[in-house]
Image: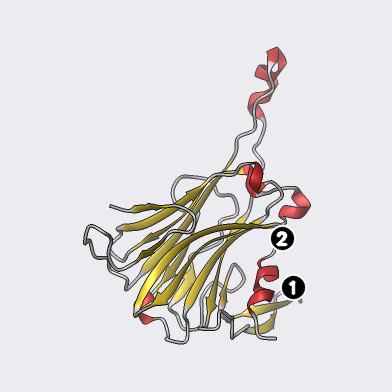
Amino acid sequence: MAINLVKGQTIDLRKNDQGEEFDLSTVTIGLGWDVKQKKAEGGFFGKIFGGGQKEEEYDLDAVAFLLDNNGKVANLGRTVQTRDGRSQGLYEGDVVFFNSQKHPSGHIWLTGDNRTGAGDGDDEQIIIKLNQMDQRYDKILFMVTIYQGRANNQHFGMIENAFIRAVDARGKEIAKFSLSGDSTYNGMCSMTFAEIYRKDGAWKFRAIGNPHQSDSFVDELKKMVYS
């Protein structure tokens, strides 16, 4: 049975308290969310004209930082030119995100960029061959950002049923950490959800749930690079 975590709780990914063991050859980190439904306008005209209102779309993006034993991102990748002539940095480095979805090692990748969050289940997934991760990586930190959240006045106070979960290679859910937006998340456009880290030869999973005002993961990345 999967463990429902609370903020700050840490578990061993190999097995739970009931002795159930998990296959960490491939671990899926699934992230999901829903946008709070706007209340329909009341009264006669609200019932007539309110039903056709289109819900606003939110583009939430999952990001993974691969950190060394100093808690730093050692490889920032390279800069490439896109087809439209723009420069794009962080390509094929130790940050897995929508513009660099697969790590050069082939051991961690983002399955795709869901731009709406529509539907049930995971909205975005990061797949990790955890048993094959190079020893130089001590921790994997998972963030979710709201694309252009500041400009669009979109924040985690408007998000509900947000979660991050870990699923083993056999499809067994190991753990899940859920949170729903409330007034404390108003104005917060990104979230450090959780981390996986090595300890005593095993992989641990810790629920974090720390919000940030910035809608760019780069602002958090700056704190994790060598000066």
Label 1 CA crowd tier, 10 Å (few <14, some 14–19, many 20+): few
Return the x and y of residue 179 as percentages of the image width and height: 52, 48
Q: Which of the 4 image quadrants contains residue 26?
A: bottom left
Q: Is residue 180 left or right of residue 223?
A: left
Query: Callout 2: helix, strand or loop?
Result: loop
Q: Is residue 198 above or below residue 157?
A: below
In the displayed structure, 43 sits above or below 100; it is above
Instruction: Answer left or right for 181 relative to 27.
Output: right
Q: Quadrant of residue 99?
A: bottom right
Whether residue 144 can be seen here:
yes
Identify residue for label 2: 214
Q: Residue at x 34, y 66 (%)?
A: 13
The 10 Å Cα crowd at callout 2, few under 14, some 14 to 19, many 20 or more, is: many
Residue sitting at x 70%, y 86%: 227
Quick one: 16 or 221, which is closer to the camera? 16
Q: Residue at x 46, y 74 (%)?
A: 108
